[in-house]
Amino acid sequence: METVSTAKAFGGTQGVYRHASEATGTDMTFSVYVPPHAEGAKLPVVWYLSGLTCTHANVTDKGEYRRACAKLGLIFVAPDTSPRGVGVADDPAGAWDFGLGAGFYVDATEPPFAAHYRMWRYVTEELPALIAAQFPADMARQSIMGHSMGGHGALTMGLTFPDTYTAVSAFAPIVAPGQVPWGEKALGGYLGRDRAAWRKHDAVALIEDGARVPALLVDQGDADSFLADQLKPELLAAACETAGIPLTLRMQPGYDHSYSFISTFMADHLSWHAERLG
Amino acid sequence: METVSTAKAFGGTQGVYRHASEATGTDMTFSVYVPPHAEGAKLPVVWYLSGLTCTHANVTDKGEYRRACAKLGLIFVAPDTSPRGVGVADDPAGAWDFGLGAGFYVDATEPPFAAHYRMWRYVTEELPALIAAQFPADMARQSIMGHSMGGHGALTMGLTFPDTYTAVSAFAPIVAPGQVPWGEKALGGYLGRDRAAWRKHDAVALIEDGARVPALLVDQGDADSFLADQLKPELLAAACETAGIPLTLRMQPGYDHSYSFISTFMADHLSWHAERLG
């Protein structure tokens, strides 16, 4: 692991790091904030998965999570959203909603994407092992959150590994990729035309198929331009209602899809995670 | 005035705006955060002046001021750091410490810079008039802060107009441009070789020449790579000591020159301003 940069912030250390990933077969860059802590302490880890077009840098620059993480004693990890580099396939037309910056947190099975797009394994296996080895992390206390495509990633990972992620929340998540244009394009492109294979990467389908978590927190701006066509939080609400999963879905009046929205509610989410992480 | 973008944040509105500036003879872009407020209320205005290479966007993205401004009821205005556009002269060698992004908050008298580099008049006259006209601003309650070159701007404007700016603070400011390489290059380039003309754009010289403010707050990281050669807070401390100006100079261990440092102490500065703005 190579250190790209570090800086003291809110008494802790904001770092950016790079490593050669076995999962993706590329170099991967990620950021980690370690709050001030006692020598030898092991701290809970909050995973933050970013949305379409983002790298680790968007939330690192604009997420405003450090004050709350410093106060609550949380490590905050922000991975990239796709493999990148020479030989990594992109959207054939260069669109921003597929390929680079749009890995959708799946392990692709379709060529040419299967060669590098293995973000599921990267985020749930390889990067946690690296975090455990390199940072003062208590891997028995992890939680996960994300935005938009990253909200999709957080929900699907949280529902798949409820024993790993003690708390799961999202900002404006894609809750049912199998039922919206972004998700149909991505899951079709990465996983192929058989929609049965998509269900384990679709939060609503996972819940319909029996996945359970103790609770979910979702914030959604009602001025979000993607709300009606791509996000559809009502589908998550209906699935949770049927399954008996306590969902706190907060429709936030006037907020859009940007980091102005995310940063406003970031401290709320971190407090909610910290309560559950103990 | 043209609205470039607006987004709801922390209950208020973060906007970016553009207008044709008479002072600089160019279009100028700036950002304004207006906190939540009662209909018809007039709010105090905090000016934030940015450092070398920055535009309004750096602090808008990374400054983490909105939570505190929302809580304290402060409007936060971030201008650009120089004129920009076709026909605006730049450093002859394209250096980052002079010309574009490096206006040093003076009205240039030297050709070719005198044609557009009029940031003193822009920040102290033209933009305040626009803010007064377009936003719910109480211009009887203004304060000013800045970072590095912008700390220089905040200190010199605050010392020159103590009746306008009720509070003055800075992050890692250039306190004596007449005595350091960045300042000698900039003041020489914009104002000419006569060092007497530089003194009204040098905080330490202004204090030596009789300028007074009720108090100053300065934070400075001790891991700032520019500390010894360009910033020299000890010169400000000595001048304030001699003049009887109460200076709170906080050397912050381990902090560098970046927004990791600024964002950590931003809320402290805003609280200090709010106390003085009433």
Image (cartoon, coloured by chain):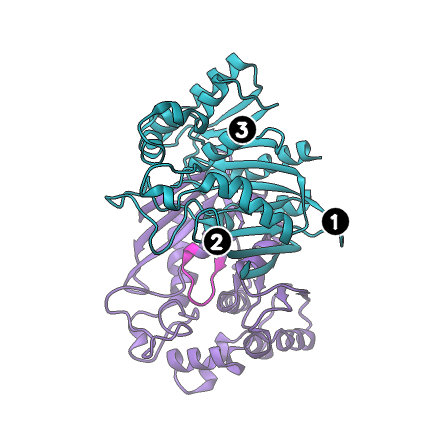
Chain colours: A cyan, B purple
**Label 3 – label 2 distance at C-alpha:** 25 Å
Q: Which residue is mark 1?
A: A41
Q: Amino acid at mark 3?
A: Thr
Q: Residue at x 33, y 37 (%)?
A: A110
Instruction: State the image coordinates of residue A127 (x, y, percent, origin top left).
Output: 55, 46
Q: Which residue is mark 2?
A: A29
Q: Residue at x 39, y 74 (%)?
A: B98
Among all residues in the image, which is located at the extreme bottom? B194
Which residue occupies the foreground of this view, A260 or B133?
Answer: A260
State which region is magenta: B48-57
Can you tell which of label 3 and label 2 is closer to the viewer? 3
**Main secondary structure along the magenta-highlighted residues:** loop
Q: Which residue is mark 3?
A: A160
Residue A124: image quadrant is top right
Say which chain tag 1 marks: A
**Residue B59 as seen in the image, left or right of residue A196:** right
Q: Amino acid at mark 1?
A: Ala
Which residue occupies the foreground of this view, A23 or A43?
Answer: A23
Question: Is residue B32 visible in the rendered structure shown here?
Answer: yes
Task: Specify the quadrant that holds the N terminus of chain A.
Answer: bottom right
Q: Which is more N-terminal, label 1 or label 3?
A: 1
In the rendered image, residues at marks 1 and 2 fall on the same chain: yes
Task: Specify the quadrant that holds the C terminus of chain A.
Answer: top right
Q: Secondary structure at mark 3?
A: helix
Say which chain tag 2 marks: A
